[in-house]
Image: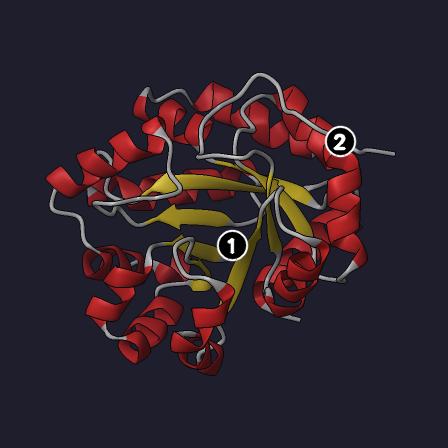
Amino acid sequence: MSQLTEAIVEATRLGHKAFIPYIMAGDGGLDTLKPTILKLQQLGVTAIEVGIPFTDPVADGPTIEEAAVRALAKGTTLRKVLETLASFADEITVPLVAMTYLNPILAYGIDAFAKDAYEAGIRGVIIPDMPLEESTIVHPSLKAYGVDLVQLVSLTSTPERIEKLTKASEGFIYAVTVNGITGARSTFEGDLESHFKKIQSYTDTPVLAGFGISTPEQVKQFGTFTSGVIVGSKIVDSLAKDDWDTIESLVKASKVQIL
C-alpha cells in the first residue's frame, strides 16, 4: 500500500473521511507555498493537491483558471514549484499530489520529473489531459520513484471503462461528481450514491469525490458513500481572500463520524 493510500485508509480507521484541499502553486507568489501547506497540515488535512499553473487547462473552471493566470504572471513554473517544495520537504508531513498537464512533464523530462517530484514530497500525480491508453509514457518512471498515478473517472464512463480505470489507478480513484469543469456548485444531478458505489465495487482502492464540492454540508453528504473528498475552487477562493475560517469549517466537516 502506498503512502498516499495509507493516509486515506488511516482517516477511515480513525472514523472520519479523507479531506484533500487543492491549492494553486504560485498564486500570490511561491513564497506563500510553505506557510499555506504547513497551515493546512496543522488543520488536519489528509493530503494536499498542488496545482501546477498551465496556459491551457482543460479541466479547470474560472476560479482555478484565474488563479493559474495569477501564478503564471508571477513566473511560476513546474521546476520552480518542485524546487520550492524540496526546500522544506522535511517539514511536510502529509502526502502531496501534483495536478499538472502532460506538456510541462514532457518539457521537464519524465525521469527527472519523477525523481524531483518524489524528493519534493510528491506521492501522487494527476494528469487530466492524459488518457489511460497513453499512461505508459510516464507510469514506469513514476512507479520507479514511488509516485502514484491517479486516474479520473467521469460520470459518463461506461462500466467497462470504469473497471479499467479503477484497476489502473494508484493512490486513490478521483471520481468526478459533475459533467464539466471544476467550480463550486450548489446542487448535483443524478444518483451519485449509486454511481460511486458502482465505482467502489470494482476496486479496494479508496474512491474520493471531486469537482464542485464547496460547503461543509456537501463534504458530509459525499462522505456518506465515499472515502473522502477533494475541494478545489472553494479552497483557492478562500486562500485568495485569506479566509481560513471557511477552510477550517470544510476540514472539520470531514472529521464528523458518519455512521
From the viewer's perspective, is the residue at label 1 or at label 2 nearer? 2
The residue under label 1 is: 94
Image point 25% across, 38% down: which residue?
A: 68
Could one spot residue 14 in this view of the protein?
A: no
Residue at 50 percent across and 66 percent down: it is 132
Q: What residue do we see at 44% from left, 24% from top?
A: 244
The relative height of residue 42 versus residue 243 in the rendered view (above or below) is below
In the foreground, 157 or 228: 157
The residue labelled by disc 2 is: 191
Number of other residues with Cα within 10 Å of mark 1, as a class: few under 14, some 14 to 19, many 20 or more: many
Q: Secondary structure at mark 2?
A: loop
Q: Camera-side residue: 205 or 23?
A: 205
The type of residue carrying mark 2 is: Asp
Tell me the quarter of the image containing the N terminus.
bottom right
Q: Which mark is residue 172?
A: none
Q: Where on the picture, by quarter, is residue 223?
A: top right
Quadrant in the rendering for residue 160 = bottom right
Coordinates of residue 116 in the picture (x, y in percent): 31, 71
Three-letter amino acid code of the residue under disc 1: Val
Residue at mark 1 to residue at mark 2: CA–CA distance: 32 Å
Q: Residue at (58%, 32%) from the top-left corner? A: 251
Left-right relation of 259 to 135: right
Residue 21: percent from left, percent from top: 49, 39
Q: In which quadrant of the rendered image does the C terminus lie?
A: top right
Query: Is residue 142 placed above or below 95 in the rendered structure?
Result: below
Category of crowding for the residue at label 2, using alpha-carbon neighbours closer than 10 angstroms: few (below 14), some (14–19), many (at least 20): few
